[in-house]
Amino acid sequence: MAAVTMPGRTLTRAMLLLMTLLLAGYGRAAQRYPAKGLVLNVDRPNRTLVVSCQDIPGYMDAMVMPFTVREAKTLGGLAPGMMIEFTLVVNQKSSYVEDVRIRNFDSTEREPVDARRLKLLEDLIDPKSRPSAALAAGQPVPNFILTDQNQRRISLGQLSGKVVALNFVYTRCALPEYCYRLSNNFGRLQKRFKDRLGRDLVLLTVTFDPVHDHPEILANYAKTWKADPNNWHFLTGSVPDVERVCNLFGVGFWPDEAQLTHSLHTAVIDRQGKLVANLEGNQFTAEQLGDLVETVISRSH
């Protein structure tokens, strides 16, 4: 049977909670609890998945949990990095999940919605301008070379053997729920994995505003997050080079007066250089992103 990798610090808590759930359901009809979280691992042959769950109010705290499903088809279409909603069923002898639904990113906030509309309009007006499809999970990420905040040339290829977390921002973004939140997520990753940065994990933040965000600007921006300059690289480059990297991950951006309208993407790449997940939007927490990164680090040894 294939082993399910879970962050070590959560394994004992998860097992204790699972036992508590079963005992709580003993002698009673099956209990059903609505839940949601970020998928960390999917094991179809063994009909299991691991999820970084959000709180179930009045029932359990947010934590990483392994779950079983009754039918393998329940796992159809699931992959690490997806946000899901599901029902946790607990009876006197077992627990399982059912009614699993993928939560596609559907923000009511103006900027990501406008970015999608502009992308559709651009494709309708000039289909030839449409970039090649973004990478799918499991595909190798092509090498790219950009310049970091200390004017060093950084290539993805030189990071082989390490897990890479990658996001996209621009320094003039003024809204706290967009670029600031994505950068803050990486600030939390830096703190959580401080003893493993450089050895197991490297953070890359790419600007999609290279005309403005030259290395000196990025260096000042990096100070906001007290970024480790050797292991958290804020990257820029020529417009074509930056656009190529953005296209690999489906990142769209368009000028909008003095600002940029843009989509939101955070990617995780494994030690072999393959894309594990491309998280769209900002609905996941920094803790959930950290759980995903920890899962990839652990399984890549």
Image: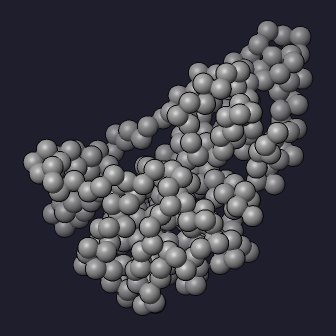
Q: Position of residue 175 (x, y in %)?
A: 36, 59
Q: Is residue 269 left or right of residue 17?
A: left
Closer to the camera in the image, 240 or 274: 274
Q: Is residue 187 left or right of residue 59?
A: left
Residue 147 placement: quadrant: bottom left
Determine if residue 86 is in view.
no
Q: Is residue 208 left or right of residue 99?
A: left
Residue for point 19% across, 67% down: 258
Residue 241 placement: quadrant: bottom left
Q: Position of residue 228 (x, y in %)?
A: 58, 81
Residue for point 42% across, 41% down: 105
Residue for point 33% across, 60% down: 247
Q: Is residue 286 above or below residue 105?
A: below
Q: Quadrant of the C terminus?
A: bottom right
Determine if residue 215 is in view.
yes
Closer to the camera in the image, 61 or 88: 88
Q: Position of residue 33 (x, y in %)?
A: 67, 23
Closer to the camera in the image, 126 or 40: 126
Residue 1 placement: quadrant: top right
Q: Is residue 158 above or below residue 55?
A: below
Q: How many marks are shown on the rendered structure?
A: 0
Furthest-left residue in this view = 125
The color scheme shown is one colour
Residue for point 89% across, 10% down: 27
Q: Position of residue 218 (x, y in %)?
A: 40, 81
Furthest-bottom residue in this view = 151
